[in-house]
Amino acid sequence: MNEKEKMEPTAEKKAKVNKAPAKKGKKEKVDYTVVKEFKKNLKEQKQQTKQYSKKILKGEIVSTTGTTPNTDKYVIELVNVKKAYITGEVETPVLKGIDLSLEKGDFIVILGPSGSGKTTLLNVISGLDKVNSGDVFVLGYNLSLLKDVDLTKFRRDHVGFIFQQYNLLTNLTAKENAEVGENLSKSKEKDLTINDIFKTIGMEEQMNKYPHQMSGGQQQRVSIARALAKNPDILFGDEPTGALDEEMGRKVLEILVDVNKKYKTTVIIVTHNPNIADIANTVIHVRNGLIDQIKRNDKPKKPSDIDWS
Ligand SMILES: Nc1ncnc2c1ncn2[C@@H]1O[C@H](COP(=O)(O)OP(=O)(O)OP(=O)(O)O)[C@@H](O)[C@H]1O
C-alpha cells in the first residue's frame, strides 16, 4: 500500500465533456445520450480495471478521483460513488454520488426506507457488486477497479457475510459448516479457533448438530461462526435478524456486538428496524440513493435494552 498511482481524469468527467448535444426541435421520451454515456463509462472502467486490478490486489493505491484513502483511520471510503441499472434504454440511478468514510472497528447500522439503496450500498462496499463510477476504497483496495476474479479473492481474504437466510449446508454439522468458512480463508495461522468461535456464539453444545436439528436463531449463529472462521476484517450483514423472532434476534445482535468488541471486527449491518440502530456507534441513513444523515452514538445500548417493534 505504498506506491500511489494517479490516473487520468475520471471516465465520468471525460464522458461529460464528450456528451452529444441534444437534438433540437425534437421531443424524445428516452434520453439516449444518458445510456450512451453510461455505456461509455463502463467501457472505460473496464479498460482501467484490466490495467489496474492486479496492482490493486497487490496493495497499490489506485484512485479515479484523485483521493488518497486514509487507511489508518478508515476501513471504508467512498468517493462520488454512482450506480445505476439500465433496462432497455432507461437508466435507473440507485446510488447517486455517495461520499462516505467509515472508521475501523465501528459497529455500523445502515437504515433507510424500502428501495432507498441500502442493500445496493452494502453490496458495493462488500465487493458483491460493482459501481459505475467513483472510488470504493475498502482497506485501501479500490473495489471499483477490481476484476470479478480479484473481487472474489478480496472477499475470500477480508470479509464475512451474514444474510437473512442462513444458507447452511444441510448435510454438514454446525462445526463442519463453520469449517467451510475456515477452508475458504487464505491464512491458516489464526488466533481464532472454531472452538473459540462456538464459545463466543454460545453453541459449544450444538457443534455436532445438523441444521434441521437447530432453531432459526441457532442456524444464524452458525452462519456467524462460518463468517468468523475466516477471521474477517469486516463482517457484513443484510437483515441478519430479519427471519428471527425477538428473542433469537436479540441473541444474534448480542453476538455481533460481542464479536465487534472482542475481535475488533468492523460490523456493518443493513436493517429495516430503526430500534437496532441504538446498538450501533455509527448510524447511516440512506434516502433516495444518497446519504441523508450520519449519526455518531457515543452510548450504544445493549441489544437486551433496545425496543424491538
Ligand atoms: N438488479 C436490479 N435491476 C434493476 N433495478 C434494481 C436492481 N437491484 C435493485 N434495483 C433497484 O434499486 C433500488 C434500490 O434497491 P435496494 O435493494 O438497494 O434498496 P433497499 O433500500 O435495500 O430496499 P429494501 O429495504 O426494500 O430491501 C430499488 O428501486 C430497486 O428496485
Image: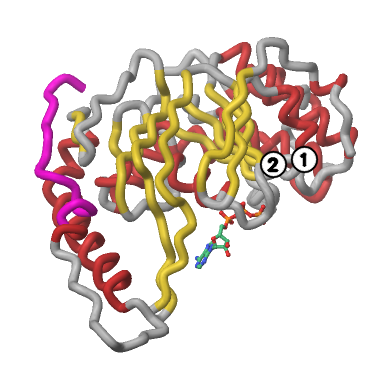
CB under 8 Å between discs 2 and 1: yes
Identity of the residue drawn at 66% across and 40% down: 111
Q: Is residue 185 visible?
A: yes
Q: Which residue is identified by label 1?
A: 273
In the picture, the disc for residue 255 is none
Residue sticking out furthest to the bottom: 26
**For residue 269, what is the image quadrant?**
top right
Residue 33's spot in the image, x, y percent? 27, 73
Q: Which residue is identified by label 2?
A: 271
Count of marks, rendered view = 2
Sort mark 2 into few (<14), some (14-19) or many (20+) by Cα contacts within 10 Å. Answer: many
On the picture, is 91 further left or further right than 33? right
Tag 1's secondary structure?
A: loop
Residue 194's spot in the image, x, y percent? 60, 24
Residue 172's spot in the image, x, y percent? 65, 46
Please name whichever residue, 220 or 141, is drawn nearer the observer in this view of the structure.
141
Q: Is residue 12 magenta?
A: yes
Residue 194's place in the image compared with 177, above or below, is: above
Instruction: Provide the residue span drawn in magenta.
Output: 1-14
Identity of the residue drawn at 51% across and 45% down: 290
Disc 2 to disc 1, C-alpha distance:
5 Å
Q: Amino acid at mark 1?
A: Asn
Please name whichever residue, 63 or 203, is drawn nearer the observer in this view of the structure.
63
Tag 2's secondary structure?
A: loop
Dividing the image into 4 quarters, which one contains the N terminus?
Answer: top left
Please name whichever residue, 231 or 1, is drawn nearer the observer in this view of the structure.
1
Identity of the residue drawn at 47% across and 25% down: 102
Residue sticking out furthest to the front: 25
Identity of the residue drawn at 24% across and 30% down: 67
Q: Is residue 210 visible?
A: no
Q: Amino acid at mark 2?
A: Thr
Dividing the image into 4 quarters, which one contains the C terminus?
Answer: top right
